[in-house]
Image (spheres, rainbow, N blue to C red):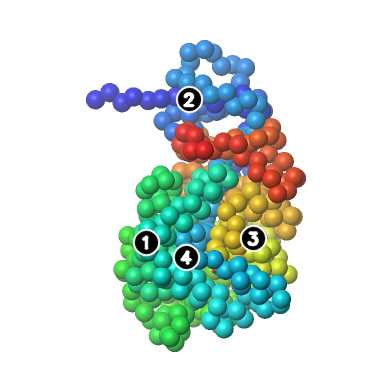
Amino acid sequence: MPVTSTTICFRNIRLLAQIESVAPVVVAKKENCALVVRDGKVVKTVKDSGIRAGQYDSVVDLKGRAVIPGFVDCHTHLVYGGDRKEEAEKRATGESYLEILKQGGGIHNTVEATRKSGEEELYQTARARMKRMIQLGTTAFEIKSGYGLDLETEKKMLRVGQSLRDKLKVPVNLTYLGAHAVPKGWEREEYLDWVIENLPAFRGLADAVDIFCEQDVFSVKDLRRLFLRAKLLGFHLRAHVEELSHQGGCYEAAKLGALSCDHLEHALPKDIRAMQLSGSVAVLLPGVTFFLGGEKIAPAHSFIDAGVPLALATDCNPGSSPTYNMQTILYLAAFLYRLSPDQALAAGTLGAARALERHKEFGGLLPGQRADFNVLKTDDYRDLFYYFGDNFVDKTYLAGEMIR
Ligand code: NIG
Ligand code: FE
């Protein structure tokens, strides 16, 4: 059977940014060019002036705008029931995130609401969130469970993630976060034993296992026990570490070969050294620093100087970062960590794809990668890092097809 192939030329691009590498950051900037896409993948870029009529199956005029890769949101908790607006109000009067959690609020409130939500209801709310994220320029996602803390609800959350992937046809990586909090009525060790024993039930549903390693939540020893087992079962490892205090989870996670260490506000030089040796990606989540009013800023430049790949993500969740917008995250990162536009853009695209181990497939808008990209409302992507609070994404393409 003959295989039909379609070649599209996206022409009249004023400025195209391709992310060639993340550690070190290399962004190729091409002016007045066109992007040639065959069967959903980038083939090459050509000079706009050299395009001849009839050379391609179709030509799309991008009207002198800037084009950047689609954003990759490599850390989200976007499947959940209810919201936590009341808790945000409490924090405004001085109660801390961990105090609220310790008193049985915080994550526990979302667990209760998520257990009560039917699968269809969870799917519909998560779908609306994901659609909004796509409208804001995100073309690939990671989604964690962690608001069930029981077999039935954790599986329900992951099935919702699978349905989103299948029905919205966007890349989604799923992570099992059974060790997100100790559910009410359980002792910590007893619950962790349960999580470890039941890991095999999540094979095929999630490709990675995650843990919230924090004071009064799970310890470094817990992380080690969980990860040793998860690794044997073939899961990738990710960890919420050094977020609100320094516990040592990053060092341990890196030593065990974690694909990513996330948060890292309190990371120390020896943690960064361990990540450098292990090749783990540092996933920074500036939305949390902003929303929880954290004083500790993740040492982004120390990671860069050590050659540790940097990624950025929303951490979209109802308690510590209720945002859908990667543009806001990139802006906050540039501002809080003093990143250049190129460093922030690379972290929110190819760096985040690397945290998912999918950087060969997408993230840089490079030849051979899928043509996932945003056409901006402007001809200079640095506007994203200058005018704050706006939405600069005009059109979003996934595998060369417009999805908004
Ligand atoms: O990434 N740190 C722990 N987990 C989430 C927040 C979850 C929640 O508060 O609902 C985070 O910040
Ligand atoms: Fe998180």
- Sequence-wise first label, 3 or 2: 2
Give the residue pinned by disc 4. 81
Mark 3 to mark 2: distance in Å?
37 Å
Give the residue pinned by disc 2. 8
Q: Residue at x 70, y 65 (%)?
A: 297
Mark 4 to mark 2: distance in Å?
41 Å
The numbered mark at residue 358 is: none
Q: Secondary structure at mark 4?
A: loop
Q: Secondary structure at mark 1?
A: helix
Q: Residue at x 57, y 51 (%)?
A: 351
- Sequence-wise first label, 3 or 4: 4
Give the mark toward the camera: 4 or 2: 4
As drawn, 1 above or below 393: above
Q: Residues within 10 Å of mark 4 (few under 14, many from 20)?
A: many
Residue 373, position as x, y percentages in the image: 54, 38
Q: Amino acid at mark 1?
A: Glu
Q: Secondary structure at mark 2?
A: strand
- Sequence-wise first label, 2 or 1: 2
Q: Nearer the viewer, residue 361 or 65?
A: 65
- Sequence-wise first label, 4 or 1: 4
Q: Residue at x 50, y 59 (%)?
A: 78
Mark 3 to mark 1: distance in Å?
28 Å
Q: Amino acid at mark 4?
A: Gly
Give the residue pinned by disc 1. 119
